[in-house]
Amino acid sequence: MLRTADLDYDLPDPLIATRPAEPRDAARLMVVSRSNSSRAEHLHVRDLPGLLSPDDLLVFNTTRVVPARLVGVRADSGGRVEGLYLRDGEQPGTWVLLVQGKRPRTGVRLTFAAPKGGPAGTVVLIDRVPDEAGAWLARVEDDEPQTLLARIGRVPLPPYIRRARRGAGQPEEMDSDRDRYQTVYAREPGSVAAPTAGLHFTAGLLATLAARRVERADVTLDVGVGTFRPVEAEMVDHHPIHAEWCSMSPAVRERLSRPRRPAPRVTCVGTTAARTVETYAALPDCPGRVSTRLLITPGYRWRWTDGLLTNFHLPRSSLMAMVAALLPGGAEQLKRLYAEAVARGYRFYSYGDAMLVLP
C-alpha cells in the first residue's frame, strides 16, 4: 500500500498558477509514457493532435461549474460568513451548503451579497446535514433557488488560487474567471470545481483533433468539494474517498468496452473522466447515473483507460495517487516527474500546465 507521505513534494509559491494560459492550448505539456519510462518531452497542449493516432478515443467530462461560492454576513452578529452551494436540498426551496464562519447554528439568517451589486439573497439555516462535515440544510428566502444562485453566486475558485493571488498582490476575483474556470464544452451544471484538464481545450483544438479522426466520447462527473480535501490517513488506501455522481450513455459504454488491442487507445481528459470510465467498467450494466467512491491507487488494474491528460495536482492528494497508479514506477516515478516540472518552471494546479501519460 502507498503511504500518504510518499505523495508529498515541495512547490515554490510562484509556480502556483493564478491565471490560465492564454490562449487555453498554449499551456505547457509534459509528455510521458507508460511503456517507456525514459520518455519525457516538453511540448504544449496545442501539440496534442500530433501525439494521438487516428481512431484514438478521447473521453471528456462535460459537467458545468455552477457559481457556488457565496460571501455575506450573519444577521445576528454582522460577522462575515462564506458559503459553498453543494446541491439543492430534497425539500423544495432548500440548498445544502458548506458554511464557514463562527459557530453557525439553526435559525441563523445569512445574507449573501451579489458580486456585482444588486439585490442580496438570504437563506436561513435549518439543520446540519448528517455525515457531511460543515454542511447545512438551508431555506432560501428570496427568489427561486437557481435564479438566486445565478445572481449571488461567485466562481468557486479553489482556495489556493485565491491565496496565491493575494500573495502576489492580485485581486482575489477576476471577471475572466467566469469564462476561464469552465471548459468550452461544458453542458449540464452540477460541479463546484472544474475538471481542470479540460480547461486547456479550445474550439480550434477540438476541430483539429476531429480532422485527424481522433474520436470523442462524453461522460459526466459532477465534481464535489471532496476533490479539495487532502488525504489524512497514513495509508492512501485507508482514505474515506468522497462520493461523486457520474453518468455515461449506453452508446459510450459500448464504444469503451469494445476490444481494441493494439488500437484504438482510450485517453481520458482528466481524473474525473478516468474515474467515471473505470466506475462504469466495473459495472455489469449501464445505469443512467451512479454514485462513485472509486479510489485508484498504485496496483489498481485499469480496465478501459489507456492514457490520461491531467494537470499537476496538490501534494498528498487522491488525484496524485491515481496518476501514480498509471505509471509503471508508481509514486516514485511521479515525484521525479514533478521535480522535473518544478525545475523547468511548469505552472501547477487548476490554472496550471498539463501532463500527458501515453500508453
Image: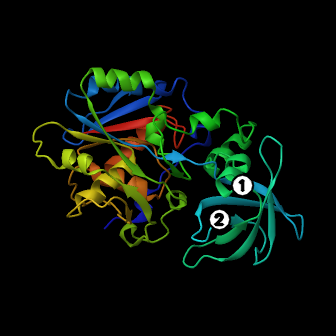
Q: Quadrant of residue 168?
A: top right
Q: Quadrant of residue 215?
A: top left
Q: Can I make out residue 113 in this image?
A: yes
Position of 111 compared to 125: left or right?
right
Where residue 108 appears, x then y in whole percent? 80, 73
Q: CA distance from mark 1 to mark 2?
A: 9 Å
Position of 243 compared to 94: left or right?
left
Where residue 103 appears, x then y in whole percent? 77, 75
Question: Which residue lies under the disc numbered 2?
Answer: 97
Of 227 and 289, the residue lying toward us: 289
Q: Can I make out residue 305 in this image?
A: no
Of 210 and 355, the residue lying toward us: 210
Q: Is residue 182 above or below residue 326?
A: above
> Mark 1: which amino acid?
Leu
Q: Secondary structure at mark 2?
A: strand
| Cβ atoms under marks 1 and 2 closer than 8 Å | yes
Residue at 80%, 51% (x, y): give it.
Answer: 113
Say the numbered circle drawn on residue 70.
Answer: 1
Total labels drawn: 2
Pointer 1 local density, CA inside 10 Å: few below 14, some 14–19, many at least 20: many
Where residue 120 appears, x then y in whole percent? 82, 52
Give the residue at the far right of this rendering: 77
Residue at 60%, 49% (x, y): give it.
Answer: 158
Where residue 98 appears, x then y in whole percent? 65, 65
Of 148 and 335, the residue lying toward us: 148
> Mark 2: which amino acid?
Leu
Position of 35 compared to 316: left or right?
left
Q: Secondary structure at mark 1?
A: strand
Pointer 2 local density, CA inside 10 Å: few below 14, some 14–19, many at least 20: many
Say the numbered circle drawn on residue 324.
Answer: none
